[in-house]
Image: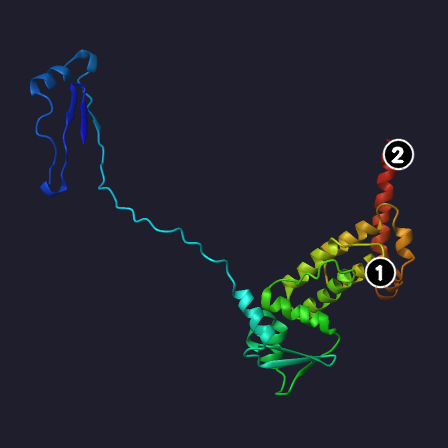
Amino acid sequence: KVLVTRYGLVNHTFSPPSYDFGYSKFVEKSRLLKSSSSKANNGYFIIRCVLTVIREPRTEVKRNLLVVPQPNLQDHLHQMWKEGQGADVTFSVSGQLFSAHRYLLAARSPVFKAELFGSMKESVVESIKIYDVEPPIFEALLHFIYTDSVKDDGDNKDETEKMQHLLVAADRYGLERLRIMCEDRLCDSIEVETVATTLVLAEQHHCGDLKKACIEFMTSQNRLGNIVATDGFKHLMASCPLLTKDILDKVSCVLSGKSRLSRN
């Protein structure tokens, strides 16, 4: 909209409907030739153009700020599970019955998928029997399948034991996210009385981080003597005796480190 030359400002408005190609006269030819022929300019001249684009003002429509609700799919699925709406499969766990939706189970667990739809699929029976899993653990397993979360029971003194059993069930049914969640919680709740049994589970179910955390706990702060006296350590010796080598190797590393520090 504004063209600037070394001889001053020239204002001109370009209007699209008129197909305007510019301003017809900026500077007289005689003055331009005189300027370009100057020795100081070496036969050159400079034209500086400043273009300002003015857009048509937009009309803003005032409206109330919308708040998009948080996703609640898990809430709806959990409600359907609790109310048994559309449930088409029943599990019997130590005599206790649990209703569920086979398509959701298959989508979440490769083991359930094979049992319910694959070559391993169960025949049509009133209920499918589940062995080696206690009802509260199977209920927690279903809770995760429907909500993708682990139910928090609060300050439950048996929480560690529950996480141990739930880890086993998660590994059995191919629920990798649940297995890792249980592993993470067990890492945060290691105690003298439970560390040996937790270490056995970590070894049997390939939980590398949990195994490392347990061995670190056992070999630090002179705890090993108290841990060896627990029933859990006796279970460790009977079921996974090779783990003692890992423990002793760690003890050796700790003692070697202390020896180097004392010499220094």
Task: Choose the circle earlier in sequence order: 1 or 2.
Answer: 1
**What is the secondary structure assignment of the residue under circle 1?**
loop
Q: Is residue 247 above or below residue 80?
A: above
Is 156 on the left-hand or right-hand side of 50? right
* Residue 25 shows up from this direction: yes
Residue placed under numbered mark 2 in the picture: 262
Residue placed under numbered mark 1 in the picture: 242
Q: Is residue 1 above or below residue 123?
A: above
Query: Quarter of the image holding residue 86?
Result: bottom right
Which residue does the image show at 60% across and 73% down from the upper left? Answer: 82
Q: Is residue 7 above or below residue 134?
A: above
- Counting labels gives 2
Which residue does the image show at 52% across and 63% down from the upper left? Answer: 72
Q: Percent position (x, y) of residue 261? A: 85, 35
Which residue does the image show at 89% across and 59% down from the upper left? Answer: 230
- For the residue marked with disc 2, what is the amino acid? Ser
Q: Percent position (x, y) of residue 15? A: 13, 39
Using the image as rendered, state which of residue 68 and residue 187 is in the foreground: 68
Mark 1–mark 2 Cα distance, whole angstroms, equals 31 Å
Using the image as rendered, state which of residue 161 and residue 240 is in the foreground: 161
